[in-house]
Image (cartoon, helix red, strand yellow):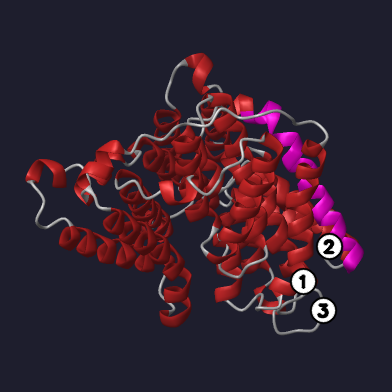
Amino acid sequence: MITTIMIIVFVLGYLAIALEHPIKIDKAASALLIGGICWALFAFSGISQDLEYEIQHHIIHIAEILFFLLGAMTIVEMVDVNGGFTIITEKIKTTNKLKLIWIISAIAFFFSAVLDNLATAIVMASLLNKMMKNKEDVWFFGGLVILAANAGGAWSPIGDVTTIMLYAKSYVSERIIIDIFIPSLVCAIVPLIYLSFKVSGELEINEIDNSNEKTINTPFERNVIFYVGVLGLLFVPVFKIITGLPPFMGMLLSLGILWMISEYLHRNKLTENKSKVSVIYALKKVDTPTIFFFLGILLAVSSLQSAGQLDILAKYLETTFNGNSLNGIFIINIIIGLLSSIVDNVPLVAGAMQMYQELLNAPGFYESDGVFWQFLAYCAGTGGSVLIIGSAAGVAIMGILKIDFIWYLKNISILALVGYLAGAATYILIQ
């Protein structure tokens, strides 16, 4: 009975997030509310006798994501307050909307493969805010960044939280780059091909005023902050591969390095000028409600996972669609991908990993690098694009650019669905 109430609370909270603008309640408040209520209900459900273990088990994963998010957002804000983004914006000369769609999508697609889709989304969202005047244009390009970043993250072992999970536990290997690249590319390109016949005209581009930074910073200082920030973000996956530590540790290390370098560069400036380009100032600009939104959503989903609802769902799919057949595997993974647009893809993938762990070393669809795991990596990575709340990249961009859930549903979701199904069909045909 209580687990049913938990699902109802989650659905109602989800609706409140979707209807944020009509009901005029910030989505972060709704997310925190359902996160707290769902865990309170779980405490009275009697499912677990060790509530402290349950919450600590999930809070580790949640804290990793939040620290990663906080570190990445601070680095991006630091580059921003020092005028570093002019290095990119000055090189993008075109105002043609169609050309920019392809350029921005290509940058997000390949950037997310080496950074990951969350860090890429944060960087690109800040860049769009600096470049474009019209809110509708910023939202539209933000939506396309979500599609491209999630598609780019799916074919890289370090491009998405779920692929990192599968790669770290040897469910997939580096071979995923070869086998999933073409389906991911199709997923990203099909919506762009459609838009090529629909989109025309020029964009109104911001004349970025960096007079404040230019009077405080020299061009050398601005370049140093930009390149150290970007290299710091690129260093994160390298740090993970070398040390085996979670990505957030690499992100915090990169932030520490940037912080030290910026303090040294600005050491002789007047206190008034230094305060405008410091990490302390950048921290004040970080979008804290987005972090609380993440926290609430992840808490709510983790409560459903602890209650066993997601495991029940995974087992239902396995028995209903015959998980022992190739066609059944394709159907199950496509559904998991679409479900990941509603609930977080991490617990869905974790549930699948737990269910088929004993088959990992046996020949067949579930062996290491088998069809099931590769297709799961693609579907879980890209299916979340169908709804803006379905992926870490989507949640980050929704928070930073203040994109309306309903607007995304009307303008981007169909493009995402078409791209997702086209990429899935490509993988199936290749197999």
Tell me how far mark 2 sits from mark 1, CA to CA: 8 Å
The residue under the point 75% across, 38% down is 415
Residue hosting label 3: 364
Asked which secondary structure carries label 3, the reply is loop
Above or below 235: residue 106: above
Residue hosting label 1: 179
Q: Position of residue 279 (x, y in %)?
A: 23, 51
The amino acid pointed to by label 1 is Asp
Mark 3 surroundings: few (<14), some (14-19) or many (≥20) residues within 10 A: some
**Residues drawn in magenta:** 408-431
Q: Mark 3 and mark 1 in contact (Cβ < 8 Å)?
A: no
Residue 96 is drawn in which quadrant? top right
Residue hosting label 2: 427
Q: Position of residue 361 (x, y in %)?
A: 70, 84
Mark 2 or mark 3, which is nearer to you? 2
- Residue 202, numbered label: none
Q: Position of residue 49 (x, y in %)?
A: 40, 56
The amino acid pointed to by label 3 is Gly
Tell me how far mark 1 sits from mark 3, CA to CA: 17 Å
Going from N to C along the chain, the mark reached first, 2 or 1, is: 1
Seen in the image, is 140 located left or right of residue 255?
right
Q: Nearer the viewer, residue 16 or 167?
A: 167
The amino acid pointed to by label 2 is Tyr
Going from N to C along the chain, the mark reached first, 2 or 3, is: 3
Tell me how far mark 2 sits from mark 3, CA to CA: 18 Å
Q: Nearer the viewer, residue 160 or 212?
A: 212
Q: Quadrant of the N terminus?
A: top right
Residue 261 is drawn in which quadrant? bottom left
Asked which secondary structure carries label 1, the reply is helix
